[in-house]
Image (spheres, helix red, strand yellow):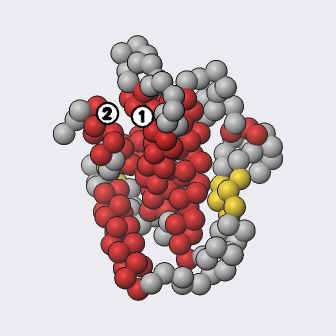
Amino acid sequence: MTPLTSDAYYNPLLNEIVFPAGILQPPAFDMKAVDAVDYGAIGVVIGHEISHGFDDEGAQFDYLGRLRNWWTDADLKAFQARGACVADQFDHYFIEENVHHNGKLVLGESIGDLGGAKIAYLAYQKSFEGKPRPAVIDGFTPEQQFFIAWGQFRGDEIRTEAQRLMVQTDPHPIAKFRVIGPLSNLPEFQKAWSCK
């Protein structure tokens, strides 16, 4: 990637995450934004890329980037069972009648989004230590601001024709499901919004 690219990636062979300068600007990162917004946007992206080291593909590489099984049998079995739950969840996200995500195709990105949201939220909560509680803004608590930031950063709208193509070939879920999917799995989201 060039420095101007607004993207990021994880390289399992070098066990590295890369963030070109292009992504370190609004809306992903803004020096003038409240912490909730930066943690909810670039923080989730950072956590997402770190989580790729432990997704269905990255988990096959050890800390030195060698393709080898480093898991205990019990840990690998538990990891695969949890991954199957995420794949099943995304199998049930429909674009239109009879057109839905392939949960196995989007599993790595879905694990990345779930791990990223969880890690970034925990980091945001940790940032409160020794400081006054952040302000409520426009009626939204700091926790709600975090989740709004992720939805605003990741969410977009694309035509149904493009969505049909994406669900067949793209390992990334449709943007709205990249928001709905991981957040529906986080008790912290439920608590922040008092939803069932």
Q: Compared with residue 56, is residue 26 higher up or lower down, i.e. above or below?
A: above
Vertical relation: 86 (above or below) 134:
below
Is residue 166 visible in the rendered structure shown here?
Answer: no
| CB atoms of marks 2 and 1 within 8 Å | yes
| 10 on left or right of 154 | right
Q: Is residue 185 left or right of residue 6?
A: left
Q: Position of residue 138 (x, y in %)?
A: 40, 13
Please provide percent x and percent y for residue 183.
36, 44
Instruction: Please tell me whether mark 2 sits on a helix, a strand or a loop.
Output: helix
- Where residue 144 appears, as percent x and y from the top left, is 38, 29
Q: Position of residue 26 (x, y in %)?
A: 64, 28
**In this view, which residue lies farthest toward the front?**
130
- Under circle 1, the secondary element is helix
Q: Nearer the viewer, residue 6 or 93?
A: 6
First in sequence: mark 2 vs mark 1:
1
Instruction: Quickly name the residue at label 2.
Output: 192
